[in-house]
Image (tube, coloured by chain):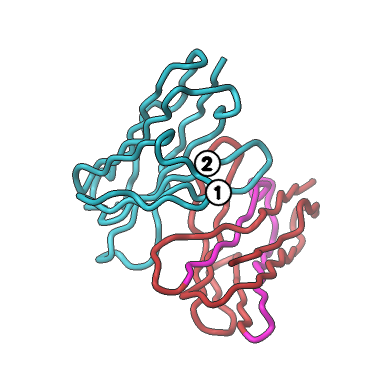
Chain colours: A cyan, B red
Amino acid sequence: GAVVSQHPSWVICKSGTSVKIECRSLDFQATTMFWYRQFPKQSLMLMATSNEGSKATYEQGVEKDKFLINHASLTLSTLTVTSAHPEDSSFYICSARDVALGSEQYFGPGTRLTVT
Amino acid sequence: GQNIDQPTEMTATEGAIVQINCTYQTSGFNGLFWYQQHAGEAPTFLSYNVLDGLEEKGRFSSFLSRSKGYSYLLLKELQMKDSASYLCAVSPYNTDKLIFGTGTRLQVFP
């Protein structure tokens, strides 16, 4: 149980375009979802926390107008990278948590974004 | 804030034991997690420490000392498949989020 999926698994886009990444909890209801970014050979950096039906809370230094997060249901959160630039190329990982399952976060398989 | 430090890289031999340390400076946290991450994949949960002491889970054990500000992950009977990055993370008080350490890349050699 506690499976989280992401779509797409990888995407290549041109500079200036927008890309949407989906994160779904498949067999549980995610009261909270998190979005992380990971550059090569680096650790995960938390970008934002989203709770279903409310606005996301962004970490310091993360532009909320550039990284749009929507958590419309208990099983789906989306991250849209707007006006993408090559420096946005990274591995984006979501995780989900259900308080009923405890403290653990369940991670999605990640999305590799390459901006050309 | 939280500064969570780990050694960048470690190497070990198959069958051996390795200890990966995690030191932190944080104002307070609910618990400390350890995750394993293979290249290009999502992190997978290994252990969670709330209280001081050792938590054992098969070949993996994790230790926490809040007073000394450190944790370690102990891997026994190393296997080639244990070559991966190991990430410690803390969950700050009154939040659900995880703040990850710098991560340690472990390479196991035959």
A96 in magenta = no
N-terminal of the pair, mark 1 or mark 2, is 2
Question: Which quarter of the picture shows residue A81?
Answer: top left
Q: Are marks 1 and 2 in contact (CB under 8 Å)?
A: yes
Question: Which quarter of the picture shows residue B2?
Answer: bottom right
Judge from the rendering whether residue A108 lies leftward or rightward of residue B71; answer left or right.
left
- Residue B25 in the image: state x and y as whole percent: 65, 72
Q: Give whichever of B16, B21 is nearer the camera.
A: B21
Q: Give whichever of B62, A88 is nearer the camera.
A: A88
Residue plotted at (49% across, 23% down)? A84
- Residue A56 in the image: state x and y as whole percent: 33, 49
Q: Amino acid at mark 2?
A: Arg
Say if A109 sits above or below A12 in the image. below
Q: Give whichever of A59, B47 is nearer the camera.
A: A59
Residue plotted at (42% across, 48% down)? A107
Residue highlighted by disc 2: A37
Judge from the rendering whether residue B85 lies leftward or rightward of residue A81; answer left or right.
right
Residue highlighted by disc 1: A45
Judge from the rendering whether residue B69 lies leftward or rightward of residue B109; answer left or right.
left
Quadrant assignment for the N terminus of chain B: bottom right
Q: How many marks?
A: 2
Span highlighted in magenta in the image: B67-92
**Secondary structure of the residue carrying numbered label 2:** strand
Q: Give whichever of B76, B18 is nearer the camera.
A: B18
- Residue B43 in the image: state x and y as whole percent: 51, 49
Say if B57 sits above or below A77 in the image. below
Q: Amino acid at mark 1?
A: Met
Please tell me how crowded label 2 is: few (under 14), some (14-19), or many (20+) other residues with Cα within 10 Å: many
Instruction: Kindly identify which chain the residue marked by label 1 belongs to.
Output: A
Instruction: Kindly identify which chain the residue marked by label 2 belongs to.
Output: A
